[in-house]
Amino acid sequence: MMRYLLVLFGILGFAGCTVQTPPKACKTIVPPPSYTLKIIDMPIDFGKARIKMTKAYIAKHYGKRVKDITITPKIIVLHWTAEGDFDKSFNRLKPQYLLSDRKDIAKASRLNVSAHFLVDRDGTIYRLMPETWMARHVIGLNYSAIGVENVGGKDNKIDDLTPAQREANKRLVRYLKEKYPTIEYLIGHHEYRRMEKTPLWLEKDKGYRTIKHDPGEKFMREVRDAVKDLGLKAPPKQ
């Protein structure tokens, strides 16, 4: 009887995080059998307020009235946090409401920025929220994008991401593509505006744009070279 209960709880584990309610202690998803990857679940605050703001963001910026915040992943977007400390990086993403120093995007929504994954300097991968919930991490593309943040990016201009982070990103991209065959694109945050020429671009506000440098051409070239067998597309050339 005890073994049956343990199996049952294991099955229910992370499935409880896919319901549109605040996640509690999410269990690690068992990856596809042909590719294993260690991921540690460390949920950010994603309660009713954040879900409500996400729905409002989708309505305002994408023109969609939705019952939930589920997405079909079609893009992987790689970022850096512009902060060299893991705790500080995590604590910027954790609150439901946007921090007061983000005046550059505050007019667009009070919804805090977020990402599905955060990669520490030693290459440890943390999952911050369910992979099929919409996160606010890239203008115009959130509704189909999985976001991967990397701790680092000195002065928000210098690629100081570690070899361990580079390897972790390569493995994570491979894991996500196998788990979600719908994924078509792999882009860096600094390339997001080139996606305006694709059907995946949804932003209604023509004045809502920011300049991004992360994670840089070198980083993206290294990751793309390592996963070129996956056939993921880069954004269209300008």
Image: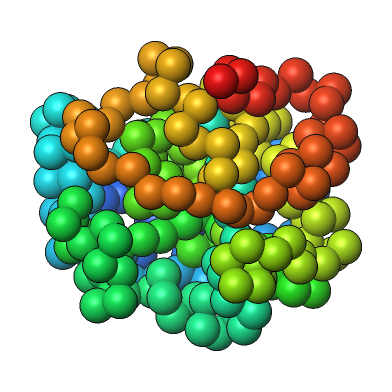
Left or right for 50, reference 224: left
The image shows residue 31 at horizontal and vertical percentages of 69, 45
Quarter holding residue 230: top right
Colour basis: rainbow
Left or right for 210, reference 117: left
Question: Is 156 drawn above or below residue 36 in the view shown?
Answer: below
The image shows residue 80 at horizontal and vertical percentages of 60, 61
The image shows residue 47 at horizontal and vertical percentages of 24, 66
Quarter holding residue 109: bottom left
Left or right for 225, reference 104: right
* Count of numbered circles on the image: 0
Depth check: 13 or 62 in front?
A: 62
Residue pictured at 13% horizontal, 36% vertical: 59
Q: Quadrant of the C terminus?
A: top right
Question: Is 62 drawn above or below residue 199 in the view shown?
Answer: below
Q: Quadrant of the N terminus?
A: bottom right
**Is residue 100 among the parts visible in the rendering?**
yes
**Is residue 76 among the parts visible in the rendering?**
no
Question: Is 229 drawn above or below residue 213 in the view shown?
Answer: above
Residue pictured at 41% horizontal, 23% vertical: 196
Question: Is 212 drawn above or below residue 73 in the view shown?
Answer: below
Residue pictured at 52% horizontal, 76% vertical: 89
The image shows residue 79 at horizontal and vertical percentages of 58, 54
Residue pictured at 61% horizontal, 42% vertical: 188
Left or right for 96, reference 164: left
